[in-house]
Amino acid sequence: MKALTKTDYNFPGQKSVYHGKVRDVYNINGEKLVMVATDRISAFDVILPKGIPFKGQMLNQIAAKFLDATTDICPNWKLATPDPMVTAGVMCEGFPVEMIVRGYLCGSAWRAYKSGVREICGVRLPEGMKENQKFPEPIITPTTKAEIGEHDADISKEEILARGLATPEEYALLEKYTLALFKRGTEIAAERGLILVDTKYEFGKHDGKIYLMDEIHTPDSSRYFYSEGYEERFEKGEPQKQLSKEFVREWLMDNGFQGKEGQQVPEMTDEIVTSISERYIELYEHITGEKFVREATEDIAARIEKNVTEYLSK
């Protein structure tokens, strides 16, 4: 099983390329974007040394499915998926913030809460909450969109408006879309025996309209719990059984890595890489309700080049 960790294409009409942590985004004629979901994996804002076979395919296919399932809520950037690892879409000017929405107190929010913090991104949190407890209503805790190698930082609605990162009208729409998308994601997850715990959305403008961009409801951008046994584990204060990238973070933390200066990424053995790949496949099948079909990995780069070039020359 091979993994695609690097791309270096020259597609027809290509103006530039941006290499993100996981995705490589090709600008075609300043009008379209071709986004390649690679098999790279990042945690604590660090790209790990080995790729995870099939991860890019899974993320791309989950995102495409959810983009298609939410077009009635808001317009999104997707035009086509010319390859299992590629989405092509309209070019948007992105807002420099990520809209993070949380239905439950866990992850970084719980770590902050446990240390005594009672306000996140300008949102007051109730006293006496426990880890993995459901919020009375989902809360929005935006972050700034950091450059590679830097950490995203929490930001409040007030700061976003004060810094002119969005107008009051735009922000109201971002909030409305965020909560509606989260509600839809929650309903779809519930049908599959899952709880959508938290997720993030990115938005941008195209022809003056706000569009949903990037990926949605994937294990890289979201956290899921299994519904079955949630209450029981919560009452006992036990960790929830979850489907997300958190297990990768936990493995790193168990091995002394949290992305801090001077820390070394632990060795990623073939067993670790395979187990991460299997967990991603498990999530894909749970979240989509479909069997995952593994695409051939002999020469992923050439396959993508052929498929995308054919799509762009139509």
Image (tube, helix red, strand yellow):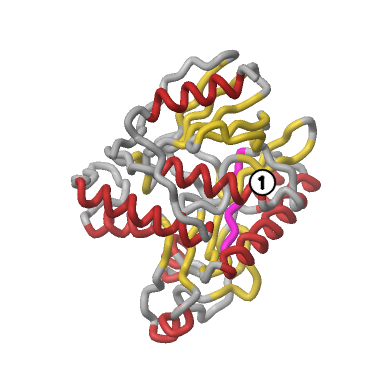
| Image side of residue 35 versus residue 240, left or right | right
Give above or below for 147 relative to 75. above
Q: Residue 175 in the image: state x and y as whole percent.
A: 71, 54
Q: Residue 166 in the image: state x and y as whole percent.
A: 72, 42
| Image side of residue 53 versus residue 72, left or right | left
- Label 1 element class: helix
Residue 112 picture quarter: bottom left
Magenta region, mostly helix, strand or loop?
A: strand
Residue at mark 1: 160
Q: Looking at the rendering, in which quadrant would you find the C terminus? A: top right
Decide whether residue 200 is among the magenta residues. Answer: no
- Neighbourhood count class around disc 1 (C-alpha, 10 Å): few under 14, some 14–19, many 20 upward: some
Q: Residue 27 in the image: state x and y as whole percent.
A: 58, 22
Q: Mark 1 belongs to which amino acid? A: Ile
Q: Which residues are magenta?
A: 96-102
Q: Can I make out residue 118 in this image?
A: no
